[in-house]
Image: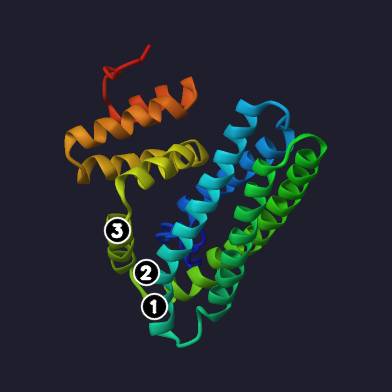
Amino acid sequence: MNPGHQPAAVQTPMAPRLDLYAPIHKALRAWMFDTVVAVGRVDGSDEPALVRALAQTEALLQISLSHIAHENDFLHPLLDGDMPGSAREADVAHQGHLRHVARMRQQVQRVRLQQGAARFAELGTLYRELGLFVADNLTHMHWEETMHNEALWARHSDAELAAVHDALVQSIPPQEMAEVLRHMLPALSPLERHGMLTEMRAQMPAGAFDGVLQLAHEVLDVHAWAELLRVLQVQPSLPHAH
């Protein structure tokens, strides 16, 4: 080695910042895509199948309203407190989403009220409206995950962001949280899912966490479920486990 040569500094990768948007947005994307497919392929003359597809659509619309409220109540005040007006574009987008949700709820009712060829036509309209709603939300979520995260990370520590996240989660009713987890757990990467459940186990009573594990068992495929058990080092003693 040349004694006058100084070795280059070793670059260590930085730990990723806490992303308040990523998990819920993965859940919403999966929920939206599943619902578009469900509405697009449903047989309008098959009453039970149609009932299920419309109920899934209404559940998506309801969780969209809740998601908007959560962001408006917890994240936008934080952004505007740092830089007044920084959440304005998202506020405008949310207002548009509220109007779109109202239109789609009316369209769901029109599908229910029609029969025969008229029902198929109304179902086609709902499918196209739902596709536009998803497209608009995909663009909006990208904005939040890039522009909003950049602003939050520049001004807040992960501990501060975690406190906001915890307050938001505590405001969510248990039934809503269970429905969100039903879509979120399969949508996360293994690393994200394992980290989330490890943190939940540390914060929740044992009985409540058993309920989360039961839900995970219901929605994960066999390989994801087995890997989760291995990482958490728990025995598969849940009801209905094989």
Q: Which mark is residue 74?
A: 2
Disc 2 or 3, which lies upstream in sequence?
2
The one nearer the camera, 87 or 147, is 87
Q: Which callout, 3 or 1, points to the residue nearer the camera?
A: 3
Q: What's the distance in space between the residues labelled 3 and 1, CA to CA?
A: 16 Å
Whether label 2 touches label 1, CB < 8 Å = yes
Q: Quadrant of residue 178?
A: top left
Q: Which mark is residue 102?
A: none
Q: Quadrant of residue 159?
A: bottom left
For the point 43% across and 74% down, the residue is 76
The one nearer the camera, 1 or 50, is 50
Whether label 2 touches label 3, CB < 8 Å = yes
Q: What's the distance in space between the residues labelled 2 and 3, CA to CA?
A: 10 Å
Residue 145, compared with residue 234, is above or below; it is below
Q: Which callout, 2 or 3, points to the residue nearer the camera?
A: 3
Give the crowd class for mark 2: few <14, some 14-19, many >=20 residues within 10 Å. Answer: some
Residue 32, compared with residue 145, is above or below; it is above
- Residue 109: where, in percent of width, then height? 63, 48
Amino acid identity at mark 3: Ser
Q: Report the residue marked by disc 1.
A: 77
Q: Report the residue marked by disc 3.
A: 171
